[in-house]
Image: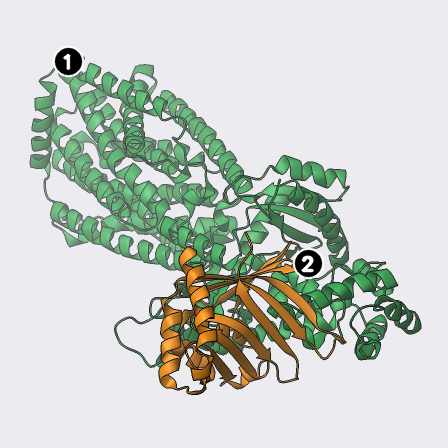
Chain colours: A green, B orange
């Protein structure tokens, strides 16, 4: 072993060691944030913050199903009792009267500050008279009777007013004392974690705590074994944890499965364990360098990126396959034929460079996830190619002979021969017809060809999303879609603005533009409003006089209302209500869910309900109403539309960049091959493979996502190697090893199809998208390239 | 509706005719009354209700209509002094007023339960349901009876000390609800003349 080889090996080992350290110390993230924009506008930032850390992201929806209603209710109570003691949860609610009791005490204590009915005229003689009359009328109803004992303290019925005020936001149905779904078949509860929704580890622990509480509560239940109640959880945190587990599981399982299959394939081909071991070096180095490059370039590695470790097997295993089979040939041919480095490396290098061109088109993308994929693939491919070029020859033992695969090549060539029997014109017109057909399919499908919804990338299954929506509807925690956002520098300013916005929105409710809305100010009015209400309470002597006048002719004794006078006087001297006072009540989570605090900005969220279920809200009218009432710093947003628009813009951007990448690749080939005809013959099979696969997916009813686009890039990247080998053969007069080259391509393609084919069976939509695009695509690329070049050759012959 | 009216008429007639026999009462009569009540699928009567409350110097009066559909739907439509509709179905009480609508789960409000469940279960002839919440005492005869209900549970006792229902055959005539603080309400029922 000469000095130069030792030097190369030391450099390689040093790089691998460095990459290993970087990989070991890298931060890995698993949420969807990799697919959210890197440089967001304020609105987009709000969207991202809301998704990642917003209070809504901390909600875990708890459903108890099956079993009978009574045991579901008992379980619900048991679970909630346990979780209330757990500091990991900021709040837990299942509608039990216990929480109601605490809420009522809070509302009653602060009734004169919280009731919307309290205005300047409320405590004049006329105002009092009207209010007390109404309270007396209410006593005739059992619901009013609930408040009978409160009459001496609350003759104006403010508590009932506040409860009506809050009842405007939808509340879940109750049965057996706990919340249930609208069909009554599920007991429901809501837990809010103390940790952020994006903290997947904390979310995972919270989920475990809920399961443990359920198991403990279930153990106390006298159970018939048959129909045991089951626990089911949903919500953003649960999704994140499930998605992480799914991606990890899929990445690990599929990597193992495809490794086993590819290793078996290579063992059968090489019949040499040491060749196999050496052959995996480019893949392993490439994956390691790829992850390290991403970690260095981005600070954190997205879980999905790791899942693509498998994609590298696709191309870099090919390199070692070419190396072993071709270097065997080179040695068999002897020195006269030239070394492998001289004969084949330039072709592989060109193939690698075309792939790099393709993947480079991902780098300028606005999606950090796509940028990562691009960098990962480029650095991984370059590393794998260099290991193949410099390390494998250095390590290759002189006595290592892999099996001669020429017979396989001959057999494949024989099959191709049959196709060539049809003649060049027939083959070309068949290709043209296929291309026309595929383009026609794509043309007719152009409206729905791309899936422009962000949910296309979500690892959460449609079934789980539907279930989540159902629970939310039952809980009245409707999926926040249309909302008004009011921003400002502090809490007080946004609460004041939210109150102004509420005035504008109330008019829209009357006009049936919207069905209703929520506002944090419903739970906690601004200090200004509270102050105004407090100052509407007259001094003790005035209030006494007003009351005396007000109840003249009413069947009430003035002396029985002494507690009211005392409470009113106490409120005049009491402090105003702050968010801290809300703690411990169920109102707290309602309030928190509608407030989003960013670094130096506060936002109040006012979710809108449509006037009729399922109907769209005219946000233009909402925005106009807000403007008319001069609500500062307010916006009306359709969150789904915003996030889809965001995704759509990145999809469009990715398509443009991919086309640019394809153009760059064409230029590269023109420079390398110096013949437009040769370039056309290299690219034609690739383009045909891509459009055929795209048409096939369209026919199968699949709407393409951004990951399908990545898959198409991979088809071009991997397929360009095939086409370039055929091109080299057609132009290098090497008749002797045509069969051998064909065999190496078939084996390389088999390993790619195995690796990506397995992805199609995963549960993660992004991996399925890749698998179903690349596996058939690369196979078709090989087939078209083989038929195309051989067809052309046979015409020459 | 015709059948219901004629049945009511028959009951009132037989009630006056058989007043003398009303003294001897027993469990058999209670079961018979319950059986009669259980047979009825629908009912519709007018009510006038008076509330005698200590906080008020004089009673307040409300009136409206009661509708019943077997086995568990009871609707109380109050027209005066303030329009309000109470609907009890499947243990959930919905209160509807001019601008608001609220559902209350009776399990969560045990203090409201006796006000509606006493009437609903009696109309349904559901002795089991009554006995889950109350201790029953029957007096009189099938043709003219008095059913006195005393709550069993302490939570329920806090709001209601006794419900007294007077009836004739499968007709309810009066429902008096007494509260532990001395307040009471008296509901008088008669065949509906409302459209």
Report which residue position mark 1 lands on.
Answer: A795
Residue A251 locus on image (x, y percent):
33, 54
Q: Quadrant of residue A148?
A: bottom right
Q: For this rendering, which residue is in front, A354 or B129?
A: B129
Residue A519 visible somewhere in the drawing: yes
Q: Residues within 10 Å of mark 2 (few under 14, many from 20)?
A: many
- The residue at 47%/50% (across/down) is A32
Residue A320 visible somewhere in the drawing: no
Relative to residue A664, is residue A241 depicted above or below?
A: below
- The residue at 55%/74% (across/down) is B175
- The residue at 28%/56% (across/down) is A253
Q: Chain of mark 1?
A: A
Relative to residue A236, is residue B185 depicted above or below?
A: below
Q: In what element is the residue under mark 2?
A: helix
- The residue at 25%/33% (across/down) is A344
Relative to residue A167, is residue B135 depicted above or below?
A: below
Report which residue position mark 2 lands on.
Answer: A522
């Amino acid at each position: 072993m000469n000095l130069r080889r030792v030097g190369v090996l030391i450099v390689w080992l040093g790089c691998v060691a460095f990459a290993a350290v970087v990989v070991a110390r890298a931060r890995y993230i698993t949420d969807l944030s990799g697919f959210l924009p890197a440089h967001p506008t304020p609105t987009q930032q709000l969207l991202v913050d809301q998704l990642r850390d917003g209070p809504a992201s901390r909600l875990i929806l708890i459903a108890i199903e099956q079993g009978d209603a009574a045991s579901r209710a008992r379980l619900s109570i048991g679970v909630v009792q346990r979780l209330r003691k757990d500091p990991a949860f900021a709040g837990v609610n299942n509608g039990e009267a216990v929480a109601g009791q605490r809420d009522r005490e809070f509302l009653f204590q602060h009734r004169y500050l919280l009731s919307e009915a309290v205005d300047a005229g409320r405590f004049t003689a006329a105002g009092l008279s009207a209010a007390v009359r109404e309270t007396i009328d209410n006593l005739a109803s059992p619901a009013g009777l609930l408040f009978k004992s409160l009459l001496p303290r609350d003759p104006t019925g403010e508590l009932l007013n506040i409860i009506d005020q809050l009842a405007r936001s939808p509340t879940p149905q109750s049965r057996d004392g706990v919340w249930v779904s609208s069909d009554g078949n599920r007991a429901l509860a809501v837990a809010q974690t103390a940790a952020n929704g994006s903290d997947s580890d904390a979310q995972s622990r919270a989920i475990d705590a809920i399961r443990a509480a359920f198991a403990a509560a279930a153990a106390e239940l006298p159970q018939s074994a048959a129909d045991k109640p089951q626990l089911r959880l949903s919500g953003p945190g649960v999704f994140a944890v499930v998605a992480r587990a799914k991606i990890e599981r899929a990445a690990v399982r599929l990597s193992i499965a495809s490794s086993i299959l590819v290793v078996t394939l290579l063992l059968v081909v090489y019949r040499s364990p040491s060749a196999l071991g050496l052959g995996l070096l480019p893949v392993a180095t490439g994956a390691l360098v790829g992850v390290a490059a991403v970690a260095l370039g981005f600070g954190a590695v997205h879980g999905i990126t790791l899942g693509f470790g498998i994609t590298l097997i696709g191309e870099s295993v090919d390199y070692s396959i070419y190396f072993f089979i071709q270097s065997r040939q080179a040695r068999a041919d002897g020195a006269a034929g030239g070394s492998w480095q001289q004969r084949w490396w330039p072709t592989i290098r060109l193939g690698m460079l075309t792939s790099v061109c393709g993947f480079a088109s991902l780098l300028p993308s606005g999606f950090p996830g796509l940028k990562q994929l691009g960098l990962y693939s480029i650095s991984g491919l370059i590393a794998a190619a260099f290991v193949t070029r410099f390390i494998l020859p250095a390590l290759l033992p002189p006595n290592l002979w892999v099996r001669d695969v020429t017979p396989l090549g001959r057999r494949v060539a024989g099959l191709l021969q049959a196709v060539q029997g049809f003649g060049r014109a027939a083959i070309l017109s068949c290709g043209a017809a296929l291309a026309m057909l595929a383009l026609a399919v794509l043309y007719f499908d152009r409206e729905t060809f791309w899936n422009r919804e962000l949910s296309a990338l979500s690892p959460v299954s449609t079934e789980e999303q539907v279930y989540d929506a159902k629970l939310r509807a039952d809980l009245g925690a409707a999926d926040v879609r249309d909302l008004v956002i009011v921003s400002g520098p502090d809490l007080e300013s946004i609460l004041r603005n939210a109150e102004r916005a509420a005035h504008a929105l109330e008019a829209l409710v009357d006009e049936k533009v919207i069905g209703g809305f929520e506002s944090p100010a419903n739970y906690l009015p601004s200090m200004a409003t509270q102050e105004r209400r407090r100052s509407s309470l007259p001094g003790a002597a005035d209030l006494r006089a007003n009351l005396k006048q007000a109840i003249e002719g009413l069947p009430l004794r003035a002396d029985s209302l002494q507690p009211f006078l005392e409470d009113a006087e106490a409120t005049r001297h009491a402090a105003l209500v702050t968010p801290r006072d809300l703690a411990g009540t169920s109102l707290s989570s309602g309030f928190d869910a509608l407030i989003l605090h960013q670094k130096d900005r506060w936002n109040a969220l006012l979710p809108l309900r449509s006037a009729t279920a399922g109907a769209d809200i005219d946000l233009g009218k909402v925005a106009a109403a807000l403007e008319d009432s001069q609500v500062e710093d307010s916006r009306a947003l359709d969150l789904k539309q915003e996030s889809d628009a965001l995704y759509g813009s990145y999809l469009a951007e990715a398509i443009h960049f991919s086309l640019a990448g394809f153009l760059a690749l064409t230029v590269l080939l023109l420079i390398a091959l110096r013949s437009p005809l040769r370039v056309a013959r290299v690219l034609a099979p690739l383009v045909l493979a891509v459009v055929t696969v795209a048409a096939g997916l369209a026919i199968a009813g699949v709407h393409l996502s951004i990951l399908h686009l990545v898959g198409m890039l991979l088809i071009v990247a991997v397929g360009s190697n095939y086409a370039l080998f055929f091109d080299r053969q057609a132009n290098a007069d090497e008749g002797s090893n045509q069969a051998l080259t064909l065999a190496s391509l078939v084996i390389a393609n088999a390993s790619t199809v195995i690796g990506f084919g397995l992805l199609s069976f995963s549960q993660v939509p992004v991996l399925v998208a890749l698998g179903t695009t690349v596996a058939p695509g690369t196979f078709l690329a090989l087939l078209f390239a083989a038929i195309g070049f051989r067809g052309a050759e046979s015409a020459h012959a | 509706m015709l059948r219901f009216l004629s049945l009511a008429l028959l009951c009132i007639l037989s009630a006056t005719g058989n007043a003398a026999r009303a003294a001897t009462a027993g469990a058999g009569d209670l079961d018979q009354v319950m059986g009669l009540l259980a047979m009825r699928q629908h009912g519709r009567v007018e009510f006038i209700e008076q509330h005698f409350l200590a906080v008020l110097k004089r009673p307040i009066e409300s009136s409206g209509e009661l509708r019943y559909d077997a086995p568990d739907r009871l609707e109380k439509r109050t027209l005066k002094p303030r329009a309000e509709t109470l609907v009890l179905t499947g243990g959930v009480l919905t209160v509807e007023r001019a601008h608001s609508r609220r559902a209350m789960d009776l399990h969560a409000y045990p203090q409201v339960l006796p006000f509606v469940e006493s009437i609903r279960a009696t109309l349904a002839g559901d002795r089991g349901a009554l006995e889950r919440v109350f201790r029953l005492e029957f007096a009189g005869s099938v043709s003219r009876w008095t059913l006195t209900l005393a709550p069993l549970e302490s939570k329920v006792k806090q709001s209601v000390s006794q419900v007294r229902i007077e009836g004739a055959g499968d007709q309810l005539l009066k429902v008096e609800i007494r509260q532990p603080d001395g307040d009471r309400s008296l509901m008088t029922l008669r065949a509906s003349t409302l459209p």
